[in-house]
Image: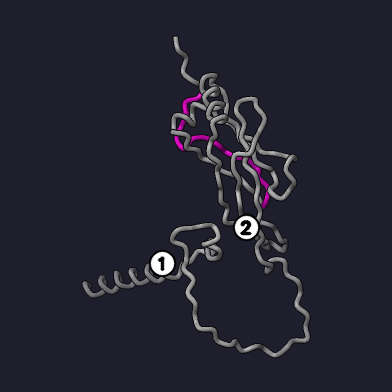
């Protein structure tokens, strides 16, 4: 009985170890250095061996858009203070990767990175005015990351005091389908009481 329990535990441990070692994410295998990721994969130079080439084929290869290399795409993240006009506040960069699903080739974004601009003095003053007036801080993103800027946008807003409460930490969740941004949830990582409690 005791030997069978030990064998069962050994089998379970080996199964877990095998599945753990077999799992590899394909999301960040390429271009880790390009995005400045710490702890990215190191490239090791292995001796080059001459591959055996197959005999030439008379059949012509079809052009498969899924096998084409990824392309880079960038789009602007904009912000506005209250009712002011929107201005650039950062940018997103991503890889545009074709993916075939159900016989259709769709474009999807992978390796999405966000670069946020720091507030200048003018923006700091505008944010202070938002706090004094208990007004909204708004953000805007293009609804389609491939279309030209100035078309359709997705807009989200939050009371400025909610961001100030969490030391200007922000949480942005993008709801996407392919290259279309359907919605953006924006606010502080924690909860914010809204509306403000009445003062009597």
Query: Relative to residue 118, is residue 35 depicted above or below?
Result: below
Image-quadrant location for residue 66: bottom right
View extreme (top): residue: 200
Where's the N terminus, which quadrant?
Answer: bottom left
The mark closer to the camera, 1 or 2, is: 2
The image position of residue 136, as x and y in percent, is 57, 26
Q: Give the range drawn in magenta.
A: 179-194
Q: SS at mark 2?
A: strand
Residue 31 horizontal/vertical position (percent):
55, 63
- Depicted 128 relative to depicted 43: above or below: above
Q: Would residue 150 be found to the left or right of residue 8 on screen? A: right
Alpha carbon of mark 1 to alpha carbon of mark 2: how far? 27 Å
Label 2 belongs to which residue?
A: 95
Q: What element carries label 1?
A: helix
Say few, some or many: other residues with alpha carbon within 10 Å of mark 2 (under 14 / 14 to 19 / 20 or more).
some
Q: Which quarter of the figure has residue 9? A: bottom left
Residue nearest the observer in this picture, 180 or 135: 135
Residue at 49% in and 35% down = 188
Of the numbered discs 1 and 2, the one sitting upstream in the chain is 1
- Where does label 1 land, which residue? 20
Instruction: Name the quadrant containing residue 39.
Output: bottom left
Query: Which quadrant is the C terminus positioned in?
Result: top left
Whether residue 184 appears in magenta in the rendering, the answer is yes
The residue nearer to you, when weighing 67 against 45, is 45
Residue 146 drawn at (x, y percent): 71, 50
Q: Residue at x 56, y 47 (%)?
A: 114
């Amino acid at each position: 009985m005791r030997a069978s329990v030990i064998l069962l535990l050994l089998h379970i441990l080996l199964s877990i170890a095998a599945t753990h070692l077999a799992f590899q994410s394909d999301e960040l295998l390429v271009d880790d250095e390009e995005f400045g990721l710490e702890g990215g994969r190191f490239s090791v130079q292995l001796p080059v061996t001459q591959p055996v080439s197959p005999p030439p084929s008379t059949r012509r290869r079809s052009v498969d858009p899924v096998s084409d290399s990824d392309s880079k795409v960038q789009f602007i993240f904009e912000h506005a203070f209250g009712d002011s006009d929107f201005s650039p506040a950062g940018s997103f960069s991503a890889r545009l990767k074709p993916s075939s699903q159900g016989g259709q080739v769709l474009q999807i974004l992978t390796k999405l990175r966000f670069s946020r601009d720091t507030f200048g003095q003018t923006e700091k003053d505008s944010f202070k005015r938002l706090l004094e007036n208990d007004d909204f801080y708004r953000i805007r993103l293009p609804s389609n990351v491939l279309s030209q800027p100035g078309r359709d946008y997705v807009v989200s807003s939050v009371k400025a005091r909610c961001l100030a409460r969490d030391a200007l930490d922000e949480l942005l969740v993008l709801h996407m389908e392919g290259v279309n941004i359907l919605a953006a949830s924006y606010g502080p990582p924690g909860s914010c009481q809204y509306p403000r409690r009445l003062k009597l």
